[in-house]
Amino acid sequence: MANYDLKNEVNDKYSLRGRVFQKLREDILSGKYREHEELKEVAIGEELGVSRTPVREAFRQLELEGLIQIVPNRGAYVTGITAKDVKDIYMIRSLLEGLCARLATEKITKEQLEEMEENIYLADFHASKGHMDQMAELDNRFHDILYEACDSKMLEHTLRDYHQYVLRVRQKTLSTNTRGRASNDEHRQIMEAIKEKDADRAEQLANGHILNAYENMVKNGLYEVYGEEAAGSE
Amino acid sequence: MANYDLKNEVNDKYSLRGRVFQKLREDILSGKYREHEELKEVAIGEELGVSRTPVREAFRQLELEGLIQIVPNRGAYVTGITAKDVKDIYMIRSLLEGLCARLATEKITKEQLEEMEENIYLADFHASKGHMDQMAELDNRFHDILYEACDSKMLEHTLRDYHQYVLRVRQKTLSTNTRGRASNDEHRQIMEAIKEKDADRAEQLANGHILNAYENMVKNGLYEVYGEEAAGSE
DNA sequence: GACGGTATGATTGTATACAATTATACGTGG
DNA sequence: CCACGTATAATTGTATACAATCATACCGTC
C-alpha cells in the first residue's frame, strides 16, 4: 500500500536514491521512457553518475508508485496502463473524491478554505488568459487541498496515488480551454457546498466532477495513453 | 500505489529479498515486532543469515505494503496504525467493496460463482462446529473471490492492500461465533444478489457488510490494535 | 535445413568495504 | 547546574566485487 510518510518525498531529495527516483519518475511521466521499455540498472546509473545500489532502491520505490514492474532476474519495465485501467481509476477516484469532499466538509480549516477560494479565483484569471500550464497546476493544487482537508492520511494517500497515476494520461497539454473553465466551475460548486457545510452535496459534486473529467477525456478521444493528444482536465 | 504484479509474490519466494520480506511481514502482522519498534538492518540480516542488501530491499517492499516507515538516515520503524486509521480504512473499503460487488455482478464467471457458493456452504458447516480458524480463512477467501471477480486489477489490488492492512487488527482470534454466522449470512445475500444480476443490491449489501464488520468491531471494544483481543470478522 | 545443446555475454542478485550521517556521551565553559 | 561543543560509536547510504541467472549465438547432430 505504499509509503505513508509523505514527508519522505522532501527528504528524498537529499539522497542519491531520492534523486534517481525523482528523475526516473519524471522521465516516465513525461513519456521519455515509453510503455514496456526496459530500464537497465547500469545504464541509468552511468547516465546519472551513481552506482547500481541507489538505482536498485529507486526501482523499488518506482515499483511502489506503480510506475515500473520488476521481474525477478529479468529487469524493470515501465508499467503498461490500459484504457480500462484508466477507466477503473476514474471510477474508484470518483467514489473516493466524493468521500473526501464529504469528510472535508467537517474537517476543513479556515486556511484551507481560503486557499481554495484563492485557487479558484486565480484559475478564473488564467482561464481568461489561456494560460494552460497554470490552469493545470492550479487544478492539481485544488485536489491536493481537498485531500489534505479530509483529515484522513489513509484516504489522502490513496487519492494521491491514483491522482499521480493518471497524470501519465494527461501529460503535457493538460486541458482544453472549455474543459478548463467547466472544471473550475465545478471546483467552485464543490467549494461552496463545503463552505455551506452541505456534506451530501459536496460528495455528489466531487463525485460528478471526476466522472465529468473522465467523460471529457473519452469524448475527446484521448485514449492514446502515451500519444501527444493525451489530455483531460479535472 | 504499490506493486501491481501480483505474481511477484510467488517469484519472490525464491530470492533472499523475498524470503526476508515474507518473514518480516509475518512477524509484523503477528505482532512479534510491535508498533514503532525500530528494525535494524544488520540485526535482521544476522538473524536470517543474509547481508544487508536484501534486507534493505525487503524494507522498501515493506514500506510499499505500508507495514514499516523508513526515515532517511535514521532507520525503519513498524508503522503505527491508529483507531482512526482503522475507521477510515473501513469507510474506504465499504465504498470500494460495494463497487467491487457491482462490477462483479457483470463480470463474475461461473466457476467463481460456484466457488462462492461452496465457500458459504462450508462456512455454515464450520460455524456450526465452532471452527474459528476455518471460518476466518473462508472469510478471507470469500473476499478474494469477490476481488478477482470484479475483473479490475486496479480495484483488486487496492482492496487487497486494505484488506491485508486490517488483518493486523484482527490478528488471531478472528471472530466471535455470532458475528461469524451473521457475516456468512451477509456473504450469502451478496452472492444471491450477484447471481440474480442485481448490481445495485449487491453493491448496497457489500457496502453494509463492511460497515457491519466495523460496527461489530467497535461494539466489542476491539480497539486495542496490538492487544490479544483484537478481532472482528467480516 | 531444422532442432537442440552448450558456451558466452549481459544483467540482475548478493556480499562486503567504505563514506556519510546521526545519536550519544563526555568534557568544558559559563 | 546547565548549555554548548566536540569526540566517538552506531547506523544508514553508497560503491564495488563477485555469484547466480537469463538471453543469445554458435555449433554440431540428425
Image: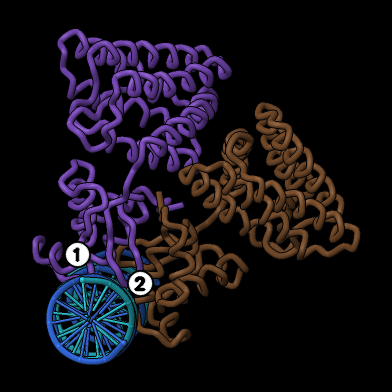
Chain colours: A brown, B purple, C blue, D cyan
Label 1 Cα crowd, 10 Å radius (few <14 / some 14-19 / many 20+): some
Question: Is label 2 in a helix, a strand or a loop?
Answer: helix
Q: Is residue B115 visible?
A: no
Task: Identify residue type, mark 1.
Answer: Lys
On screen, residue D8 versus residue D21, left or right, reads left
* Residue located at (53% from left, 43% from top): A151
Disc 1 chain ID: B
* Residue located at (29% from left, 67% from top): A73
Label 2 Cα crowd, 10 Å radius (few <14 / some 14-19 / many 20+): many
- A54 or A88, which is in the foreground? A54
On screen, residue B178 versus residue B172, left or right, reads right
Residue A11 pos. (x, y %): 44, 70
Q: Is residue B159 above or below residue A13?
A: above
Mark 1, residue position? B40
Give the tally of numbered discs.
Answer: 2
* Residue located at (16% from left, 17% from top): B131
Mark 2, residue position? A56
Residue B169 pos. (x, y %): 28, 34
* Residue located at (60% from left, 34% from top): A106
